[in-house]
Amino acid sequence: MRLSLATLLAALPAAPLALALVAAPAALTLSATAAQAQTKVKIMVGGVDKQIYLPAKLAEQLGYYKEQGLDVELFNTTSGQAAATALLAREVAGVVGFYDHTIDLQAKGKFITSVVQFAVAPGETVLVKADEAEKYSNPANWKGQALGVTGLGSATDFLTRYLASRAGLQNQDYTLVPVGAGDTFLAAIQQGKIVSGMTTEPTVQRALAKNAAKVAIDLRTPEKTRAALGGDYPAACLYMDRSFMEANKDTAQKMVNALVKTLKWMHSHSAEEIADKMPKDYYAGDKALYVKGLEDGRAQYSPDGLMPAGAPDSVLKVLATFSPNVKGKTIDLSKTFTTEFVAKANATN
């Protein structure tokens, strides 16, 4: 089921998010019936058809949620920022988004925790207009330009700002334009509304096939990510409000069990076999391009769901470089992720 952002926001209570945070943990997100003996879990995904978040849908397609006694409903929104807002409002039990939001939100006094890592690299690329690729492939030349991101406050926002900062630019030296992904991203770069933009598969392959853009910076593997960012940047994950997680450990464990099993399945099957399991409308009209995207980006996926050693420090370093929200703040990284559930999942899967 897909839920539009407009519908989601209309459903949110008028009270401030701070009040929503003290609501009963399971009130809006979990329910069980004796007849079905399944626990209902609502999960928001910051782009359910994006390959960076593929394990969330694949686990459903493989039947692994039901195997754990879960009835998981995946809701779609356009960006990780909107998904995080839904989590803090207790509209959902968890969010499939980027790990960096756990640090950004802790800096604002909100504690959310990654319970399983899907990815050990962002899985993103910076695309530049094909006819201006030579110039704008270098972030130092972004001064005065419009740069595309999924949404303001999203992980693509964070990463774009860091790349610009690393090239010597200040936040005010360029303009970030929220262009989403898919058709809206392609239109923005083809029409010259942006000179470059950060996006993911399957949008990347579609842009390349149309000769509308070229890859300037590749963040689809740990090695290329380290070269571009100066360190590791674990990205896609399932995160939960920390108090909710602690109050619903059995449900959290079952979710992680299903997702770790999915990650292991992915590492033992080809890109073609993975694509065969996904809904056909996820192919964006071209299965061959979808498979190519999976092949090019499969190194991003974690083999076991564990957080890479030292990686949270690297993400914090990136955010503290440019973000006024994080710079100078004391962040307890031990509360931004946990290996408790993943360790148990790996012991049984």
Image (tube, grey):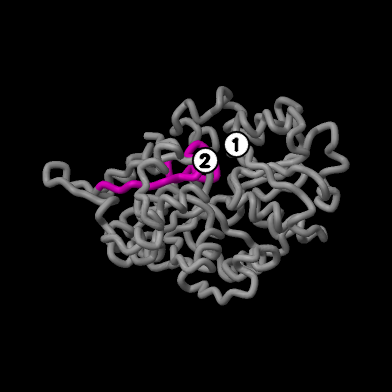
Identify the magenta region: 40-58
Q: Mark 1 points at which residue?
A: 181
Q: What element carries label 1?
A: loop
Q: In the rendered structure, does residue 46 fall within the stretch colored magenta? A: yes
Q: Residue furthest front?
A: 14
Q: How crowded is mark 2: few (under 14 residues within 10 Å), some or many (20 or more)?
A: some
Q: Residues within 10 Å of mark 1 (few under 14, many from 20)?
A: many
The location of residue 4, given as percent across then percent down, is: 44, 36
Three-letter amino acid code at disc 1?
Answer: Ala
Q: Residue at x 32, y 64 (%)?
A: 22
Asked if residue 177 shows in the view, the reply is yes
State which quarter of the image contains the N terminus.
top left
In-image side of 288 versus 118 (left or right): right
Q: Where, by quadrant of the figure, is residue 279 drawn? A: top left
Look at the numbered discs 1 and 2 and tell me whether their residues touch, using CB distance below 8 Å: yes
Three-letter amino acid code at disc 2?
Answer: Thr
